[in-house]
Image (spheres, rainbow, N blue to C red):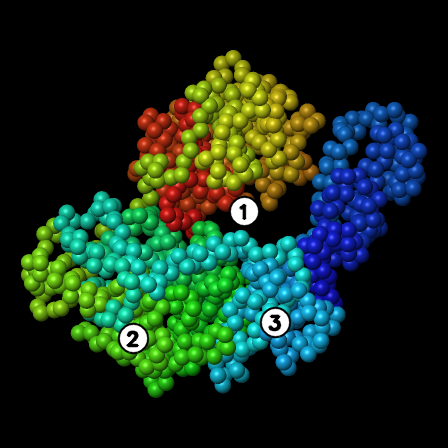
């Protein structure tokens, strides 16, 4: 109970914070002692409210608790004493000395006497130890950093510094859950219940005055978890298992949560519960519906292109050079047959006539039509390959091995993303592979990326959207888990646990702005999940042994399922969502095999599947089967079926290494007539996809009514691995060219930390600053050269003969100041006014690189061209540390708070790690990275050896003229390396990590650029020199500082221009596999 009481306090704290009851919030924090609010404490310290500081602190610790607490109280009272002295309030200072500081006299009498002596000084800074004391504001900020370290080290504050992870508005959710449960227990529940009070239990029998309509607040609850559950079968209510309303565990939740309210009116009603919501009659601004939900629904509807009217989209035109088609192929009029728009869809329009047989050398396991092109068919096989076919020309457009890391695996499921830019493959090895595909030419882009998703096999995979911009993939497997992955980053967002057997299928769906997920396991259990909740909403058993497929009609209005039965009872159902019962049992579906039956729907009217070796068709509204079709080559007892996007073609998976493609009788007759008009009385001939002959082969197969194409698996010397993506011009990217007109080459380039500016340092020691609105995408429309006044300029000091000096620059964390050097003094500029604040450290030696301390903006590490390293306090104008371990110029510096260290690298690729203890720097380790070929003097001048920590601070990127390395920290070992080769043989001129540390952007002396995967330094994209322009090359490179624009980077050019690029590669993925 004590634990639950503590959690209740946290729920109340969250509620107070969301409702902005700040005073009550901090009072409860102090009185409960459960949570120390560091931000509130910092605000009090910075405002100098010393009485409030001690009062808040007293709720957690006292001066006598331990030495950490004593030190905390001493620092606070000392600062209070010094500020009184600075204001010449000697009486107040004496009172502080004799009351607040007197307690420390017994511990250190000498210090107490020294502090007493400050009373007689006109300025306490005359004391040598306080000579560097600045103003009160700066002193408070520095003192807070010290207090923060003491608090974090103090065992009294253990478990009090972090607020527990929980869903937003959790207290409101718990109340809504209780109200819904009370409403469920009402003897005569009202359709629209009235809630006037929380002081007594809700009952529809109570005669409360009618409040404002509940519907007035329904929009504020949209996006809630809602009562999303699954149907309860008639006579099977005993199988329902309700999830407990316990505090949520978020161990598997890593994405942005949705606001919750279990009484959502617009949520799908799967349970047989009274209609209408039970909600607290309040309106809170933070409960408002996220604006992206409408976009989510629109996207979901856009991908459902098989409408009731079925207007065909027609075939997409694919550039022949991209697909390398033969010079002479099937006439175009054949292509248009299956794209013909249909004003209606009747029984006679159902595909029942075989027009094409695709034969494979490896057994196909999965099929899927393109979401918008009627002729493009995807097929995966037992050998781990996915192939793309154009059914209008019988050509294989490409084939890709989806498992480069594991051999002897099969593709269990292959599906398209909603826009056709990605292909997802569920593998028998437990891995999931995603392949980017160009949305125009349907050619593969780069290599597939893989992630280890499940233990055992991955059985199903589906794409869906969680927001207007977040595409995710849902997977399930033999390990009884359902997982949700962010497509772009590869991050696992959710893990759903609860199934007790292998999970066979998943069905993500969006209905009435609610995103949810259904899953079915081998033991016959179906579960419904809400993203952000770890418990399923309802579990129930279905008829038959187990369910193998769950799907919605294409307009989302009807839910169907099928499974394995006993051979005498149907397992094909439509569910009544309103009442939680089976609405329709379709007869003649008698699957009793171990094969996984799959159904598909078309025109929001018809169901099709393979059962008893036949194709079977049903009308949504008729329980009896319409008809069945027996093909010449026997089908397996159960198999996969798939309609194309306008319902004109149906693909069926065979058991003897074939896929059948069917069309309606009318379309098949049209096709035969078309062939006769071309002088081809007999059906189409056999064509080897591997050979792709220029002229048709004239010997037709014997008496067949189908087109037959032999699909031969290419030999291994024809590698399935696609080359990295090639960008040959700026049209393939979103780009913006920035100029300032001086024509001097760019030496250094950096984005502002807030992502709204780009600062460049030219070879003439002059800075150029471009700014735009906060949205990083606006750089392409709004970026403009900015100056506070027309005559303002930021120009570094330059020493005689410093034209070839290494330039360096760094921006403060608040984007207010810039430290910069171009071979002369180090200059400190105000970035808002362009005024120089200070100039220090004249050469020799000259500054060659700089880095701000990550916690103190006043501390800067400066590397110099003689190999020495300085730690400099700008505010005090004081060199704190000076060490020398490098034999030549230091060219890169990087701080790490995680490892409490500083890393330095010199032009000879020597890496040193410096431990930081009590502001003292001592060398901990070093590493010398040797290139196979030592860089020439020209290469060394052209490229600075740089270092950069990844976001996790577990690895360093080290870039040399002839080598890239990912170095693990603290082991200081190279975990991956890359040297220029093949098409990228030029010298590396600059390299940097993307802000999310998933990519590396790299420029080369020949004008090309490349994007690497961080995990294994594999090249994912190559930019042709044409992108930059003839004779130009990248001299400096910088990545955008906002992870929302992780693929955007800027290239400083040799002519002084800056080119901002964001590759537009359809579904280019950023996953990395270490």
CA–CA distance in space, label 2 to label 1: 54 Å
Depth check, front residue: 101 or 259: 259
Look at discs 3 and 1 and give the one toward the viewer. Answer: 3
> From what the image shows, is residue 761 above or below residue 955?
above
Residue 1010 appears anywhere in the view: yes
Look at discs 2 and 1 and give the one toward the viewer. Answer: 2
Q: Residue furthest top?
A: 800
- Residue 42 is situated, as x and y percent measured from the top left of the image, at 73, 43
CA–CA distance in space, label 3 to label 2: 41 Å
Which of marks 2 and 3 precedes in the sequence? 3
Element under label 1?
loop
> From what the image shows, is residue 183 above or below residue 691?
below
Which of marks 1 and 3 precedes in the sequence? 3
Depth check, front residue: 225 or 909: 225
Look at discs 3 and 2 and give the one toward the viewer. Answer: 3
Q: Residue at x 16, y 49 (%)?
A: 326
> From what the image shows, is residue 554 above or below residue 331?
below
- Residue 514 is situated, as x and y percent measured from the top left of the image, at 51, 63
Q: Which residue is mark 2?
A: 617
Q: Residue at x 58, y 24 (%)?
A: 788
Q: Which residue is mark 1?
A: 952
- Residue 710 is situated, as x and y percent measured from the top left of the image, at 17, 61
> From what the image shows, is residue 912 above or below residue 572?
above
| Residue 419: image tag | none
- Residue 274 is situated, as x and y percent measured from the top left of the image, at 58, 76
| Residue 192: image tag | 3
CA–CA distance in space, label 3 to label 1: 51 Å
Query: Within the image, what quadrant is residue 401 found in?
Result: bottom left
């Amino acid at each position: 109970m004590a634990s639950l009481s503590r959690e209740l306090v946290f729920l109340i704290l969250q509620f107070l914070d969301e409702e902005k009851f700040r005073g009550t919030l901090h009072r409860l924090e102090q009185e409960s002692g459960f949570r120390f609010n560091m931000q509130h404490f910092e605000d009090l310290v910075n405002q100098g409210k010393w009485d409030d500081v001690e009062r808040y602190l007293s709720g957690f610790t006292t001066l006598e608790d331990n030495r950490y607490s004593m030190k905390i109280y001493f620092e606070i009272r000392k600062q209070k004493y010094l500020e009184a002295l600075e204001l010449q309030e000697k009486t107040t200072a004496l009172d502080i000395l004799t009351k607040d500081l007197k307690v420390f006299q017994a511990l250190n009498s000498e210090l107490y006497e020294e502090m007493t002596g400050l009373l007689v000084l006109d300025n306490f800074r005359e004391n040598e130890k306080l000579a560097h004391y600045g103003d009160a504001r700066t002193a408070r900020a520095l003192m807070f950093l010290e207090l923060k370290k003491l608090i974090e080290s103090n065992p009294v504050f253990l478990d009090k510094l972090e607020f527990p992870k929980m869903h937003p508005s959790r207290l409101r959710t718990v109340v809504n859950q209780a109200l819904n449960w009370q409403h469920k227990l009402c003897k005569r529940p009202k359709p629209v219940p009235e809630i006037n009070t929380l002081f007594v239990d809700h009952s529809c029998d109570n005669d409360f005055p009618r409040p404002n309509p509940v519907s007035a607040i329904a929009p504020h609850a949209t996006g809630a978890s809602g009562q999303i559950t699954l149907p309860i079968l008639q006579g099977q209510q005993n199988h329902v298992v309700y999830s407990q309303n316990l505090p949520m565990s978020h161990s598997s939740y890593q994405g942005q949560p949705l606001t919750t309210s279990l009484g959502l009116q617009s949520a799908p009603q799967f349970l047989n519960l009274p209609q209408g919501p039970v909600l607290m009659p309040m309106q809170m601004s933070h409960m408002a519906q996220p604006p992206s939900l409408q976009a989510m629904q629109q996207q979901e509807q856009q991908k459902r292109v098989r409408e009731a009217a079925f207007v065909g989209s027609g075939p997409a035109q694919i550039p022949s050079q991209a697909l390398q088609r033969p010079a002479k192929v099937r006439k175009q009029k054949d292509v248009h047959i299956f794209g013909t728009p249909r004003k209606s869809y009747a029984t006679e329009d159902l595909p029942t006539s075989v027009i094409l047989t695709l034969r494979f050398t490896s057994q196909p396991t999965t099929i899927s039509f393109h979401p918008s092109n009627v002729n493009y068919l995807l097929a995966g096989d037992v050998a781990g390959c996915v192939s793309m076919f154009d059914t209008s020309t019988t050509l294989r457009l490409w084939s890709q091995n989806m498992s480069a890391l594991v051999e002897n695996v099969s593709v269990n499921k292959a599906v398209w993303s909603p826009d056709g830019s990605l292909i997802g493959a569920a593998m028998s090895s437990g891995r999931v592979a995603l392949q980017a595909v160009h949305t125009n030419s349907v050619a593969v882009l780069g290599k597939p990326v893989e992630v280890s998703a499940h233990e055992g096999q991955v059985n199903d995979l589906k794409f869906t959207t969680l927001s207007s911009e977040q595409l995710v993939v849902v997977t399930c497997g033999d390990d009884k888990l359902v997982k949700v992955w962010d497509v772009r980053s590869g991050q696992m967002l959710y893990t759903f646990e609860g199934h007790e057997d292998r999970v066979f299928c998943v069905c993500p769906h969006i209905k009435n702005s609610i995103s949810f997920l259904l899953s079915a396991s081998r033991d016959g259990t179906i579960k419904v999940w809400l993203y952000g909740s770890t418990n399923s909403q309802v579990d129930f058993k279905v008829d038959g042994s187990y369910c193998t497929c769950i799907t919605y009609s294409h307009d989302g209005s009807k839910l169907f399922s099928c499974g394995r039965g006993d051979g005498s009872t149907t397992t094909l159902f439509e569910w009544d969502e309103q009442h939680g019962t089976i609405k329709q049992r379709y007869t003649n579906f008698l699957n009793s095999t171990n094969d996984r039956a799959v159904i598909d729907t078309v025109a929001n009217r018809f169901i099709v599947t393979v059962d008893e070796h036949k194709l079977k068709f049903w009308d949504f509204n008729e329980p009896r089967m319409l008809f069945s079709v027996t093909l010449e080559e026997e089908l397996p007892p159960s198999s996969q079926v798939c309609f194309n996007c306008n319902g004109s073609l149906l693909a069926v998976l065979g058991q003897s290494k074939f896929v059948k493609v069917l069309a309606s009788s009318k379309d098949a007759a049209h096709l035969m007539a078309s062939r006769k008009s071309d002088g081809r009385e007999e059906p189409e001939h056999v064509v080897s996809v591997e050979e792709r002959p220029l002229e048709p082969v004239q010997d037709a197969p014997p008496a067949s009514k189908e087109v037959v194409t032999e699909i031969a698996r290419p030999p291994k010397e024809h590698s399935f691995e696609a080359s990295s993506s090639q960008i040959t011009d700026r049209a393939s990217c979103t780009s913006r060219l920035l100029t300032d007109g001086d024509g001097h080459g760019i030496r250094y380039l950096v984005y502002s930390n807030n992502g709204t500016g780009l600062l460049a340092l030219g070879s003439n020691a002059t800075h150029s600053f471009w700014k735009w609105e906060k949205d990083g995408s606006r750089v392409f429309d709004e970026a403009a050269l900015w100056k506070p006044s027309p005559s303002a300029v930021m120009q570094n000091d330059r020493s005689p003969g410093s034209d070839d000096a290494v330039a360096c620059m760094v921006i403060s964390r608040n984007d207010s100041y810039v430290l910069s050097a171009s071979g002369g003094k180090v200059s400190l500029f105000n970035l808002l006014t362009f005024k120089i604040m200070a100039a220090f450290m004249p050469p020799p030696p000259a500054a060659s690189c700089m880095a701000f301390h990550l916690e103190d903006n006043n501390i800067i590490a400066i590397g110099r061209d003689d190999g020495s390293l300085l730690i400099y306090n700008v505010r005090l104008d004081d060199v704190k540390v000076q060490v020398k371990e490098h034999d030549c110029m230091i060219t890169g510096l990087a701080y790490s708070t995680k490892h409490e260290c500083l890393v330095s690298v010199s032009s000879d690729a020597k890496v040193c790690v410096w431990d930081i203890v009590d502001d003292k720097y001592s060398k901990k380790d070093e590493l010398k990275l040797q290139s196979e070929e030592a860089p020439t003097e020209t290469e060394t001048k052209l490229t600075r050896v740089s270092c950069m920590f990844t976001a996790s601070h577990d690895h360093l990127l080290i870039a040399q003229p002839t080598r890239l390395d990912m170095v693990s920290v603290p082991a200081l070992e190279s975990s991956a390396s890359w040297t220029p080769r093949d098409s990228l043989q030029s010298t590396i001129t600059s390299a940097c990590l993307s802000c999310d540390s998933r990519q590396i952007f790299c420029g080369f002396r020949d004008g090309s650029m490349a994007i690497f995967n961080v995990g294994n330094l594999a090249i994912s994209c190559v930019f042709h020199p044409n992108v930059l322009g003839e004779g130009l090359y990248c001299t400096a490179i910088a990545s955008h500082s906002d992870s929302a624009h992780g693929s955007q980077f800027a290239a400083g050019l040799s002519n002084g221009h800056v080119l901002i690029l964001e590759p537009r590669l359809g579904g280019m993925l950023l996953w990395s596999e270490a």
